[in-house]
Image (cartoon, rainbow, N blue to C red):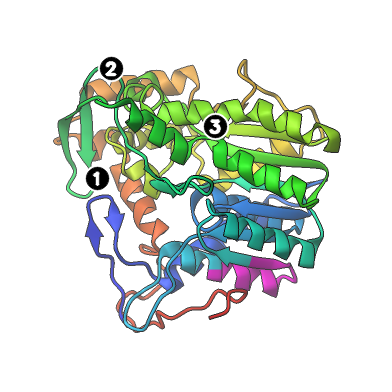
Amino acid sequence: MIIQPRVRGFICLTSHPEGTAAHVKQQIDYVKSKGKIENGPKKVLVIGASTGFGLASRITAAFGSDAATIGVFFEKPAVEGKPGTAGWYNSAAFEKEAQAAGLYAKSINGDAFSDEVKQQTIDLIKQDLGQVDLVVYSLASPRRTHPKTGVAHASVLKPIDQPFTDKTVDFHSGVVSDISIQPVENPSDIENTVAVMGGEDWKFWIEELKAAGVLAEGVKTVAYSYIGPELTYPIYRNGTIGRAKDDLEGTVSVLNDLLKDLNGISYVSVNKALVTQSSSAIPVVPLYISLLYKVMKEKGIHEGTIEQMQRLFADRLYSGKAVELDEKGRIRVDDWEMREDVQAEVAALWEQISTENLEEISDIAGYRNDFFNLFGFNFDSVDYDADTNEVVDVPSIKG
């Protein structure tokens, strides 16, 4: 079929198998260009492995350290006449590239919150790898069915205590406008968001992997968070999502106690603001990112997801030196984003930004391009008017 982008709001309803493969290959080539990561991980489990930071982590481990990888995700395969999700195509492309390079790569498609998928993953590790020495937790989901209680939790994106009003942008039309979001009315909204996006499921994974004996001596585990600038605090860090991130970050001490007898360690890495499916859904953030991109590109310090993950692995997790942490015990690879000169310039632009000058003083074009890249579009090497086979298999997933 011929696959073109079809967009509804912050969601692209279609994805392109050849374009996503080009995107994956682009990321692999970047990691290979940086050379091998000395003493990097060799057997890696990535939970949430199909897009964004999870996919970039899997690529970095495999092509930076020759690691065997198992990826867990929840994606829709294509059926005839209907494309699969971008994450499905990403995973298919990754596995094919890994196998061509002689690297072990297998995937599990299912609800990572469930006990069944945890057990399936444990069985695969036992069967093929024995143990893993790195567990990356990078799930991004709007809802979770709790595996112990059966309760379905849905996250909400809201401020707490008072309404929030600021600028936002429709990044498709380029219209800058004010948006107001009412605060949570019921404390259960906060509790549900924490249940979905907090650290409990990460803890469940590590507990079950350890109990099954599939965590290696000296195992590391890392999950991802975000802080951002003060202008996004009301809707992000001080809002419902921020409470969930606090819970995630607080899980580190629990996991460190759990892993002590294995000489293992857990980390939360605070990453840079980037164009992802999740960030596109948050009001204010796309406008902030478009200004941030402008400033960081002009300074020569812009990074995408793959650059962030390669730096995290090479310069932090596996540098051979003590991992530098902030006052709250977090790794900071948002350090370039949060530089005083960068934030001062972004803040100055924020005061000026309007529909009329958006294209001139922001990198909204770069934002749009990165958004479409997520779904396999806007790659020069792909002919989007040509017929393509939408039915693509992930080699390790049968049926």
Assess disc 2: are there few (<14), some (14-19) or many (≥20) residues with their C-alpha within 10 Å of its C-alpha: few
In percent of width and height, residue 44 lies at 71, 53
Judging by the rendered image, the residue that carries numbered circle 2 is 161
Can you tell which mark lies on residue 377? Answer: none
Q: Is residue 42 left or right of residue 58?
A: right
The secondary element bearing badge 2 is classed as loop
Q: Is residue 345 left or right of residue 316?
A: left
Q: Is residue 103 located in the magenta-colored stretch of the structure?
A: yes
Bounds of the magenta span?
92-106
The secondary element bearing badge 1 is classed as loop
| Residue beneath the point at 75% across and 45% down | 210
Judging by the rendered image, the residue that carries numbered circle 1 is 171
Q: Measured along the vertical axis of the image, is residue 186 above or below residue 328?
A: below
| Residue beneath the point at 49% across and 62% down | 23
Q: Is residue 154 left or right of residue 297?
A: left
Looking at the image, do the residues carrying marks 1 and 2 touch, with CB atoms under 8 Å apart? no
